[in-house]
Amino acid sequence: MQISRRDFLKYVGASASALCLSRLQIERVEQVFAAASSPPVVWLQGAACSGCSVSLMNAVSPTVDQVLLNIISLKYHPNLMTAAGDLAVQAATSAEANGNYILVVEGGIPTGSSGKYCSVWDEGGTPVTMASAVSRLAAHAQAVVAVGSCAAYGGIPSNFCGSAVKGVGSYLGQSVVNVPGCPPHPDWMIGTLAAALSGSLPALDANGRPRTYYTSEVIHERCPRRETEEASDFGQQGRCLIELGCKGPRSHADCESRKWNNAQNWCIGANGLCIGCTEPSYPSFPFYGGGEGDEDVGDDAVSGAATCVPASDATPTPPGDLNYHIYVPVVRTSAGED
């Protein structure tokens, strides 16, 4: 379905509140469309699961087809573009030659073995690594946006892939706009790109995140369960999950008000813990257990070496080290205790 520019601007106006766009930014978007041009977008994928792109496609107001047809001039995206092979590569390299585009990076950047763990395409029969592509394209970009926690801070791949994965800003050695989450909410991505298209990048916090979506108050401060009785086990409806390891006390995002799946629910509303997926420390293990939001978990947890031991009645360990840290129930022991 293709809609007119006039109709799309109506959608933008109606969605301004949800996307947290200012009147000035909406006027700038209108000016861009009046000129029948907008900065193109080049979207690269590195060490990730494509979940951020899947989240983008779950956008509701506006929908992803409205976004792709009317707000974003998407020149390259491995999953969403119709071209393939040499035609797809040509789209990316042409955008690079013309410059003044917005570079969106999804997934971390493997740097081990000169980046050979991840290639994005071939040029003349020679693989182009993700690291090389990001370096080249960032040099000519109007703005660089790191989408998802893997791109923003390294995420799960930096802890478990063994390929020296880095976040985009860390790899480039420069400030970028970070839109973390595993995955990020579609509004966070679309709103940030809309702001970039307006020529006015959003105000960022100390971790490079748009303050509009990644609030200064932690989720726990605004959680509707904050003043309720604390749950002692999962499945206790409506109770605070802090003693089960909920990381809301140290996580910054507007999940509790924005919600997911067309504003239907969010992690804690579904009786699941906040796992802190918007934070630079993500993934901080264990996901489940520890109590008080795992506030006492230090650098060992960030690296994946959780400071805990399996409970004596733990379920059988699922295969894989990552699954072990996520799923096996844990209990903490004090120093000197068995």
Image (tube, rainbow, N blue to C red):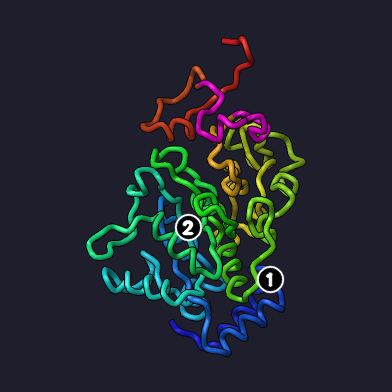
Q: CA distance from mark 1 to mark 2?
A: 22 Å
Task: Give coordinates of residue 220: x percent, y percent.
Answer: 71, 44
Callout 1 amino acid: Ser
> Where does the C terminus fall, quadrant-wise?
top right
In the image, is residue 272 above or below residue 5?
A: above
- Is residue 183 visible in the rendered image? The answer is no
Residue 160: say if magenta: no
Asked which quadrant contains residue 193, the reply is bottom right
The kind of secondary structure the magenta stretch mainly shows is loop
Per the image, the residue denoted by label 2 is 52
The circle drawn on residue 320 is none
Q: Nearer the viewer, residue 123 or 330?
A: 123
Residue at 49%, 85% (x, y): give it: 3
In the image, is residue 233 above or below residue 154?
A: above
Residue at 44%, 69% (x, y): give it: 42
Per the image, the residue denoted by label 1 is 17
- Is residue 208 visible in the rendered image? The answer is yes
Residue at 61%, 9% (x, y): give it: 336
As helix, strand or loop, the secondary structure at mark 1 comes to helix
Q: Nearer the viewer, residue 213 or 134?
A: 134
Magenta span of residues: 290-309
Please report whichever mark, 1 or 2, sits nearer to the chain's N-terminal start.
1
In the image, is residue 208 above or below residue 333?
A: below
Task: Single out the residue that lies furthest toward the left.
Answer: 125
